[in-house]
């Protein structure tokens, strides 16, 4: 067994989780910085351009979350379980299977958005100059959807081996070039022509092209756990199924998560869009460690990894939620100074913020369940959350007319989401036997 794989199933859990999470957190910081810089410079083109890009953002986020977190989790889980079970040939073959899945989903997104973008953005409220800006940016970005899917899928392959550093290095290095390249192509700095709003999209595609090439070269360099090859590889449905049975269910969870956040309240709910990728920083190591442990037959360790990771995520997100509830204006003033927005957003954060720990609990166990290949209950929990948040909030608003009751429905939805995921894992959803996170169980050797 490769030493990196052995670390995942033998090294101390807390130290290993935190060490693997640090590169992912750096990636999140780099990506957030690039997004802020691009938004700033596109804003210089005018309100219509900024509004157009804002309409494309949720669709782009959906594709990012599906390719990196949902199907990417399925890929990492399949790789980890194969390596943990010493099925090296399967692990190597899964690389090309993952690439084929990425190509298929990338083409599907490209055709769907290029063909239906005008209708979609019209439904979202675009018209006139904002529609033109949205279509220009969207058509460029989604023409390269395959690149986004390939980049995130290859990064997921590498993370599945327990290597979080290489995807982080590629992402941070690429972002360092993307930040100056984006305004250069937007405004025509130096030798570059001025592409306007399309320049931001072209810079983004250049980033994904270079990043995909770098990740592909690393996988074929022979300097990693995997040694993929196109020679003698026959595509097998069981390997596709091993990825899709996790990734497809996770994609449904991603869709319902986005719908639930949209059902939240404006600027106040934006904090949840930051919490999801933040927990992903810890979630990617959870997928790798749980999957490898299960592949190696170490069920007890897999459960301990899940509960310890859930504890860390719960404490982290609860601290953020309590901070937002105590100082809501510090967060809300980053977006607008309108008194009505500040007041309503503050009410949202004061009611919902104290329950953000349940979001961390639910999402961390969702990622751990990806590693275990058991996603039925996280899917159920997410749909229950959506139902309570949307239907419950609507009923409360019609009966009372008080927006605070809508926020209470959001809080109840988070509690249900967290409890369903926790009770399902504790009740034996993975292995059929109860696995409550007692102190003795968490300390018991693998």
Image (cartoon, helix red, strand yellow):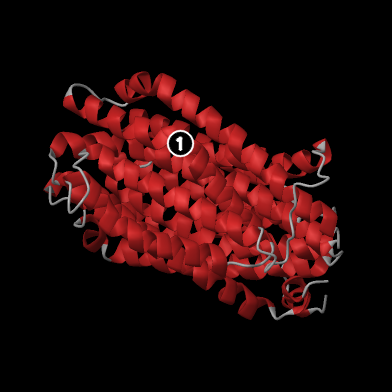
253 left or right of 391 in image? right
* Residue plotted at (30% across, 21% down): 122
Closer-to-camera residue (265/82): 82
Q: Which residue is mark 1?
A: 259
Closer-to-camera residue (223/162): 223
Q: Is 163 rendered above or below residue 193?
A: below
271 left or right of 156 in image? left
- Specify whether residue 434 is in view: no
- Specify whether residue 4 is in view: yes
83 left or right of 403 in image? right
**Residue 48, quarter of the rendered image:** top left
Closer-to-camera residue (232/248): 232
Q: Is 198 rendered above or below residue 230?
A: above
Quadrant holding the C terminus = bottom right
Q: Residue furthest front?
A: 191
* Residue plotted at (64% across, 71% down): 308
SS for dot 1: helix
């Amino acid at each position: 067994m490769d030493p990196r794989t052995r670390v995942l199933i033998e090294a101390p859990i807390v130290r290993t989780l935190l060490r693997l999470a640090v590169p992912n957190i750096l990636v999140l910081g780099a990506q957030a910085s690039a997004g802020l810089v691009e938004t700033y410079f596109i804003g210089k083109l005018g309100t219509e351009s900024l509004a157009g890009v804002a309409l494309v953002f949720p669709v782009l986020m959906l594709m990012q979350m599906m390719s990196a977190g949902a199907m990417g989790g399925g890929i990492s889980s399949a790789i980890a379980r194969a390596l943990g079970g010493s099925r090296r040939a399967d692990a190597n073959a899964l690389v090309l299977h993952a690439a084929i899945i990425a190509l298929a989903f990338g083409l599907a997104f490209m055709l769907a958005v290029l063909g239906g973008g005008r209708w979609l953005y019209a439904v979202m409220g675009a018209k006139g100059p904002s529609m033109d800006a949205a279509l220009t940016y969207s058509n460029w970005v989604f023409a390269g959807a395959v690149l986004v899917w390939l980049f995130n899928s290859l990064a997921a392959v590498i993370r599945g081996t327990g290597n979080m550093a290489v995807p982080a290095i590629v992402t941070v290095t690429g972002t360092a070039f993307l930040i100056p390249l984006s305004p250069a192509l937007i405004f025509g700095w130096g030798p570059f022509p001025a592409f306007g709003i399309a320049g931001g999209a072209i810079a983004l595609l250049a980033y994904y092209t270079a990043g995909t090439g770098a990740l592909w070269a690393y996988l074929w360099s022979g300097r990693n756990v995997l040694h993929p090859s196109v020679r003698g590889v026959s595509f097998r449905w069981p390997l596709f199924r091993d990825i899709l049975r996790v990734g497809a269910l996770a994609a449904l969870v991603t869709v319902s998560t986005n719908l639930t956040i949209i059902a939240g309240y404006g600027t106040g709910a934006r904090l949840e869009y930051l919490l999801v990728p933040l927990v992903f920083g810890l979630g990617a190591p959870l997928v790798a460690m749980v999957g490898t442990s299960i592949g190696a037959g170490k069920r007890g360790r897999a459960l301990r990894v899940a509960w310890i990771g859930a504890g860390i995520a719960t404490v982290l997100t609860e601290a953020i939620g309590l901070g937002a509830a105590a100082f809501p204006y510090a967060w809300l003033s980053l977006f607008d100074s309108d008194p009505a927005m500040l007041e309503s957003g503050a009410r949202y954060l004061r009611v919902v913020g104290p329950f953000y720990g349940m979001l961390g609990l639910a999402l961390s166990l969702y990622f751990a369940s990806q590693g275990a290949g058991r996603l039925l209950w996280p899917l159920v929990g997410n749909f229950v959350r959506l139902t309570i948040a949307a239907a419950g909030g609507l009923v409360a608003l019609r009966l009372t007319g008080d927006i605070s009751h809508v926020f209470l429905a959001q809080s109840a939805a988070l509690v249900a989401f967290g409890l369903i995921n926790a009770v399902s894992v504790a009740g034996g959803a993975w292995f059929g036997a109860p696995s409550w996170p007692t102190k003795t169980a968490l300390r018991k050797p693998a």
